[in-house]
Structure formats: structure tokens, C-alpha cells
């Protein structure tokens, strides 16, 4: 069943592809080759990035190392770093339309969504700026009159930051400002599919007053550039967001030199719905959770676990609302679901749908690619009759595909929710708050939404259990993740505990 709300893309006939440079030690460099990015929603080249090399990565790491060991950034006061981050936030806000446009044409996300993400990113930079002034250690004046203990928090050093293609500017903003607030220096590698807005961020940070070498931005592939960033002995920490498979490789690379690792990985996130739920509110949240960013979202609500008594009605209502979702031209402000990132990924999504159908699931809506004349698009899809053993119920599809499973008891719902390798987020819908709290305490996930889905705030930590990652981003402790603790154990007065006297 195809959708009816299409917004056909218009060719980018008046847009000249933008040529970018990498940022290494405060200077812009071309690199050894060129990567061309074809807009997934418009089918034409929109950006050209340098194809970074191992030598480029080594130069960037050396610049970050020198900036940390000899430069002013780690030795600035928290207030000084905070002021620079606040200037950066203001400059991001001033260039938000430009940044949103780049994210839209390079990733295929809707322009209205991209502008919303830029607003969220500005808030994160301002929040991180506040935390730069709040970072502190501990003191222990309770160890006896001859001892004073002080625990310092020091910047961990050089941080490699590797970000994915699905939220280019938002995800780098969940990492970089907190590392900078702590006093770290960085090497940043955005996805080779969506590097434009991160490179513009480099311009913004230099203008805001970040010293040369503190932020270096590389473009290129994981095997060529990312491998150096995750193995080099002068890198002290890695912050990575991406697939669980690449996360495992990153962790293995880091193990060679025992680097600290923060990983935000995949998800297969359930929404558990009880018979007493407000179905009007849930249905809207279900459509949003499944099709926001075309489902290319680690915390997408891709698994609905519905009580059997309401499953048929809820599924029909979700399908009815999903038919109204506008799919098409990412640059049209009315578009709600944009393009799929690459033709290869579109084929992968289709393979999951076909596999589910062969395994006994029914396609209640969509299930097919859309030919809109330019780019690659997927119809919002609903699969009913899905069981927990199907790949579509266990693996991250990363597309606009919603799987419907059913349960009869609370214990069964919890068992289905936890019967996967992921644990990023979950949702529960019930007017009974005891039920919500029971699910919240029993489901193994880093975030559990109650009678809402995919809400967030800069103040709230985000991360996952099990194969959804290690560590947390955002929240008041986010800056601390980029620090080491050092204990100063001070003796006061004459020695009182003689050993060899």
C-alpha cells in the first residue's frame, strides 16, 4: 500500500556544490583526494570534502597533543572557556539556517527538522558553557588532624570524536562542547557522507576564540582516518557514536593502548502499551517515534509491544495517521519524512521488510521504496504479526519500519522488551503510574519515557545498556566524562607514623 502524501523533490539547479577543507592546527588543508557527496533527496553533487589520509590524522593528533601539553586551553579558567563556548553558541545561532541547509541536503532530513536540531544544539553549547564553570573536585577534612585529602578533576587530554551521518550537527554538539569545557583538545571526524556542517563549525570555533590545535576536523573514511584516531598512543580518549559493529571495532582498537572509551551505539527500542493508555496521544507518538528522521535514528521507537486487547485497533489507527505523513523533498518545509541516506541503505531496509514477510509478518502499510523522480525514499511501513524471533524485531533496521508485537501480561511485555542485545531507550503507556514505574524499573534501557516518547533536554543524560553503548552524554556529569581524577594526600605537621625508626 503506497502513501498518498508525496512532496516531489525539485532539482538543485541553482546550487553550486561547496568545496570544503579540513582543519588541522588552525589551518585549512585540502588533503590528498576528494570525496563527493550526492544529495540523497535530490540526486546531485552538493559537497566536496578532502579525502583525509593517515598522515593527515597523525598531523591532527600531533597538533592536539601540542595544544594540550603546551597550549593555553587546559590552563584557562573555567570562566574563560565558558565565555568562548558562549560566543560559539551565539555564532551557531547566527548561522543556523546555513547549517540546517547543509545537514538537509547532505543527509536527506527535512529542513524543518534540521532547523529544530540546530536550536537544540545551541542550547547544548550554552549548557556545556555553564558546566565549564561548575567542574570541581572534592576535599576530605575527615581523615584525622594530620591528613587532608583533595581530589582534583583534570582534563583527560586529547580526545578523538567520531560522529555519524544521521544527526551531523546535533551529535557533534553532544560531545565536543563538553570535551572543550573540561579543557581537552580534540580531533573530530564527521561521517564522510555528512561532513559539511561540522567543517563550518570549525570556522565558528576559530572565530569564537578557540586556539589553534584545540579543535582539529578531519574528513575521510574510517579505515584511513578513523583507525589512526582510535589507535594512536597520543590519543587519551575516544567518543564514538555509530553502529554497534563499528563500536566493537573502536573498542578493540582502543584496547591496544587502554584508552578511555565512550560509545553511543544502536537501539531496538520498544514502546509498551497497556489497555488503559490514552490511545490518541500514543498513536501520534508512535508515528513520530517510528518515522522521525525517516527512522534513521538510534532511539527510534521501532518496536511496538501492544496488549492483545488493543493491538488491532491501535495498529489501524497508527496506519491511518501514518498515511497523512508527508514524504518527499527534504527542502520543502511541509515534508516530515525525507530521503534515505544512500541507495545501499534503502536496499538494506527493503531486505528487512522482505525477510519479515517471508517469516510470516504482514505488511499493514507501505513496505516499498518510493520513486519520486530524484533521490531515494522509503514509504513509512508497518509490519504486524511480528514475533520476537524475527530479525526485524531483533536487529536495528535504521529506516521507517515499525514492527508490531503483542503481549498479555506485564511480565510477558518486560520479557519481550528485554529479549534483545540492545538497551538504549524504551517507552511505556498507561494511566496507572504504578504500571509505568514497574516497566521503568524492569526494562533494561538507559532512558524510559512514560506517556511520551523521544523527549529530551540538555540536562538529562543519554546512553544505553548492553550493546547500546558505554557511558552517558548530556546531563551535569557530561563534562566529568572527559576528565581524570587525581588524589592529593597531604600530611600536616610532623611525621607520626614512623616505620623504620
Image: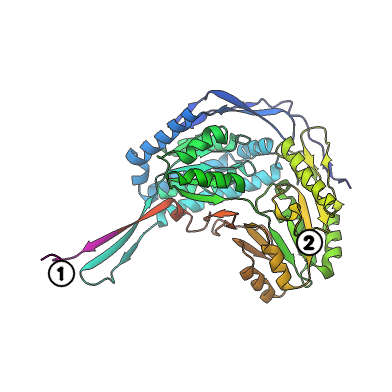
Find disc 1 in the rendering and name its residue. 496
Query: Mostly what secondary structure, the magenta segment?
Result: loop
Q: Is residue 15 covered in magenta? A: no
Residue at 31% x, 67% y is 140
Find disc 2 in the rendering and name its residue. 405
In the foreground, 178 or 497:
497
Q: Quadrant of residue 19?
A: top right
Q: Position of residue 343 (x, y in %)?
A: 74, 35
Left or right of residue 188: residue 145: left
Residue found at the far right of this picture? 1
Few, some or many C-alpha atoms within 10 Å of disc 2 (few <14, some 14-19, many ≥20)?
A: many
Q: Which secondary structure lies at badge 1?
A: loop
Tell me: residue 455, above or below residue 80: below
Query: Between marks 2 and 1, how big is the CA–CA gap?
Result: 69 Å
Few, some or many C-alpha atoms within 10 Å of disc 1 (few <14, some 14-19, many ≥20)?
A: few
Per the rendering, the mark at residue 406 is none
Residue at 53% x, 44% y is 250
Q: Is residue 489 covered in magenta? A: yes
Q: Position of residue 221 (x, y in %)?
A: 57, 33
Q: Which secondary structure lies at badge 2?
A: strand
| Residue 226 seen | yes
Range shown magenta:
488-501
Amino acid at each position: 500500500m503506497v502513501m498518498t502524501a508525496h512532496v516531489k523533490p525539485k532539482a538543485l539547479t541553482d546550487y553550486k556544490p561547496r568545496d570544503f577543507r579540513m582543519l588541522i592546527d588552525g589551518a585549512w588543508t585540502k588533503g590528498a583526494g576528494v570525496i563527493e557527496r550526492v544529495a540523497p533527496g535530490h540526486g546531485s553533487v552538493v559537497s566536496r570534502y578532502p579525502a583525509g589520509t593517515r598522515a593527515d590524522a597523525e598531523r591532527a593528533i600531533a597538533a592536539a597533543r601540542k595544544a594540550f601539553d603546551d597550549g593555553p586551553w587546559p590552563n584557562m579558567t573555567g570562566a574563560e572557556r565558558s565565555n568562548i563556548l558562549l560566543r560559539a553558541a551565539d555564532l551557531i545561532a547566527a548561522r543556523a539556517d546555513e547549517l540546517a541547509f547543509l545537514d538537509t541536503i547532505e543527509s536527506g532530513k527535512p529542513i524543518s527538522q534540521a532547523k529544530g536540531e540546530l536550536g537544540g544544539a545551541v542550547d547544548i553549547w550554552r549548557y556545556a558553557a555553564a558546566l565549564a564553570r561548575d567542574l570541581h573536585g572534592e576535599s576530605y577534612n575527615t581523615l584525622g588532624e594530620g591528613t587532608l585529602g583533595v581530589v582534583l578533576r583534570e582534563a583527560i587530554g586529547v580526545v578523538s570524536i567520531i560522529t555519524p551521518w544521521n544527526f551531523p550537527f546535533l551529535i557533534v554538539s553532544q560531545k565536543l562542547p563538553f570535551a572543550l569545557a573540561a579543557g581537552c583538545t580534540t580531533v573530530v571526524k564527521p561521517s564522510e557522507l555528512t561532513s559539511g556542517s561540522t567543517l563550518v563549525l570549525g570556522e565558528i570555533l576559530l572565530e569564537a576564540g578557540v586556539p589553534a590545535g584545540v579543535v582539529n576536523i578531519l574528513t575521510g573514511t574510517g579505515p584511513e582516518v578513523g583507525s589512526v584516531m582510535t589507535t594512536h598512543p597520543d590519543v587519551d580518549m575516544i567518543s564514538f557514536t555509530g553502529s554497534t559493529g563499528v563500536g566493537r571495532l573502536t573498542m578493540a582498537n582502543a584496547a591496544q593502548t587502554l584508552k578511555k572509551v565512550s560509545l553511543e551505539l544502536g537501539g531496538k527500542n520498544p514502546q509498551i502499551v497497556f489497555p488503559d493508555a490514552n490511545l490518541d496521544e500514543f498513536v501520534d507518538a508512535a508515528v513520530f517515534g517510528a518515522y522521525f528522521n525517516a527512522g534513521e535514528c538510534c532511539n527510534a521507537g521501532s518496536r511496538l509491544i501492544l496488549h492483545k486487547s488493543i493491538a488491532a485497533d491501535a495498529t489501524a489507527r497508527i496506519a491511518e495517521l501514518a498515511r497523512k505523513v508527508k514524504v518527499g523533498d527534504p527542502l520543502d518545509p511541509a515534508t516530515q519524512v525525507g530521503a534515505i541516506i544512500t541507495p545501499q541503505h534503502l536496499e538494506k531496509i527493503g531486505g528487512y521488510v522482505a525477510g519479515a514477510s517471508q517469516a510470516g509478518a504482514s505488511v499493514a502499510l507501505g513496505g516499498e521504496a518510493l520513486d519520486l523522480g530524484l533521490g531515494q525514499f522509503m514509504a513509512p511501513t508497518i509490519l504486524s504479526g511480528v514475533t520476537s524471533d524475527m530479525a526485524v524485531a531483533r536487529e536495528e533496521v535504521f529506516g521507517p519500519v515499525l514492527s508490531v508485537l503483542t503481549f498479555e501480561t506485564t511480565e510477558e511485555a518486560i520479557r519481550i522488551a528485554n529479549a534483545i542485545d540492545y538497551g538504549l531507550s524504551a517507552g511505556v503507556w498507561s494511566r496507572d503510574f504504578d504500571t509505568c514505574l514497574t516497566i521503568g524499573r524492569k526494562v533494561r534501557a538507559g532512558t524510559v519515557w512514560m506517556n511520551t516518547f523521544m523527549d529530551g533536554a540538555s540536562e538529562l543524560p543519554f546512553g544505553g545498556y548492553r550493546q547500546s553503548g558505554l557511558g552517558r552524554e548530556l546531563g551535569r556529569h557530561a563534562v566529568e566524562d572527559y576528565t581524570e581524577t587525581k588524589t592529593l594526600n597531604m600530611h600536616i605537621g610532623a611525621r607520626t607514623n614512623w616505620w623504620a625508626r
